[in-house]
Amino acid sequence: MKSGIYLGPPLGGARGLGKFLVLFGVIGTLFHLGIYLGQVREFEAVRSDVERRDGAVANAYSLLVEVELAESERAVLARLRALSESGAPTSILMTELLQLVANALPDEVALVGLSFDPSTSPPSLLVEALAQREQDVTALVRRMAASSRVAATRLLGERSAPDGMLSVRLRVDLNTVRAP
Amino acid sequence: MRAMTIAVVALVLVNAAIAILRQSASTDRAALVDAASTLSRQADDYRFSTERRRELDLLVAKARSYTEDTRDIGAFRDVLVGAEQGLSIDRLSLEFRPEEQLPPEFGGSRVHASLRGRFVAIYDYLERLEAMFLPLSTENLTLRGDASSVTLTVQWAARWPLIGSEGALELSPTEVSSLNQWLSAEPRSRPDRDIFSFRGVEAVPVTRVSELPPSALPPSEDRQEAEPERPVLTGFVLARPELEPDVRRRVLAALRYEGEVRLVMVGDTIGAYVVDRMEARDSVTLTRADTGERILLTFE
């Protein structure tokens, strides 16, 4: 009977290491595969989102094309452009000024003159009026100042006429944008 | 042992392949995300443009119904003169002056207007103009009252689009919004008093014979004997013949005849009269065609 010592790698350990490596490799591969499949799902979701958006763009574009302006509409548009260029849409209406003064005028006050100058900053009104009593002048100034259209009022002059009436001059600065 | 080695190598290769696929999927995904955001922006742009266009369509429809087509100075003149009809305006004068430094796509003129009448008539005239949404902006305005009437002096800047100015069709969202707001404005009610008189002592309106209803006039036999209606001088229109093909003279007289103001030049016929001579801003001489009688019209 021969007996000796085996000097090679331990047979059981090598197999164990090999098994471990294969197992580790399989787990890693499955892990990788899982991540990849997740990415593929995400990719598909993004792709369907892009397709949806592409449809929305096409739809929006078709609507845009549908509402191309006709020739007659272009003429109206040119008119609108002139309206805008004239500054009329944003300017203070003349009837609004008269209404403003009428609302502020006490019964015992009558206008002599009214001037509107939109070129000053802010645009201003010069009101010249005849009042029967001092308190009417105060009422005029107070009522005028109470309007949302009015930024400031200034009594420029007040004098008594020979007939006992009070002649007043009032400057009214206007807000360019009406208060809500 | 060998089988294990082969298995390990195979696993390594599979992993490498998966890594490459993951890298490629990641690159493709990034490209798709980019495309999605570009498409999203594009869709928003188109949607915004479509909404703006819809808003513009509404504005165009509104403008078509409400605004006057003042495409040249002659249209302005006719609108400004025509707006006084039936309002008992005693005096109406208009002067059109050239305006410098206009944008190339617009025509324009300064308009000086002077009107005299009762406060109510002046107010209604201004209200009519506002209801027509004209491209006029007020540069200054003065109202002066005397015993029975009010005189309005106003200077407007008028604009109109020049034909073929296709480049000028852009309107900013702010302009669209302010135009929409302006065109939707409700007319305000007229003041309940004449602000140039103390309340209770308003000027009594004077009714002219030409404004009386037929029942208030004398019987027809009497009227047959009456003189032909004489035009009344209302004012002058200082035109710009270089811009108004229908006007050959700088000065036109505004004569009220049969209840409306008519613009006439020397040589024109109005009723039974021919316009003989005009002194600008002062008087008009008419000759009655059948009798040769001459009458001098001055401001009343």
Image: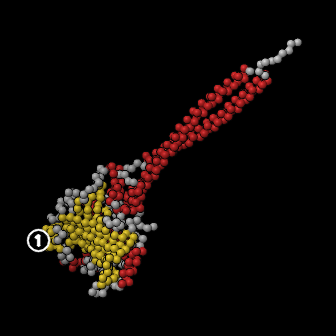
Of all residues shown, which one is farthest toward the left? B292
Residue at figure coordinates x 39%, y 50% from the top left = A69
Residue at figure coordinates x 21%, y 60% from the top left = B240
Residue in front for this viewpoint, A134 or B249: A134
- Residue pointed to by mark 1: B292
| Label 1 secondary element | loop
What is the quadrant of the N terminus of chain B in the image?
Answer: top right
Rendering coords of residue A155 (x, y %): 34, 77
Q: Which chain's residue wears label 1?
A: B
Rendering coords of residue B298 (x, y %): 17, 74
Residue at figure coordinates x 34%, y 60% from the top left = A87
Residue in front for this viewpoint, B102 or A67: B102
Residue in front for this viewpoint, B207 or B4: B4
Q: Is residue B216 left or right of residue B47?
A: left
Amino acid type, mark 1: Gly
Q: Is residue B277 left or right of residue A125?
A: left
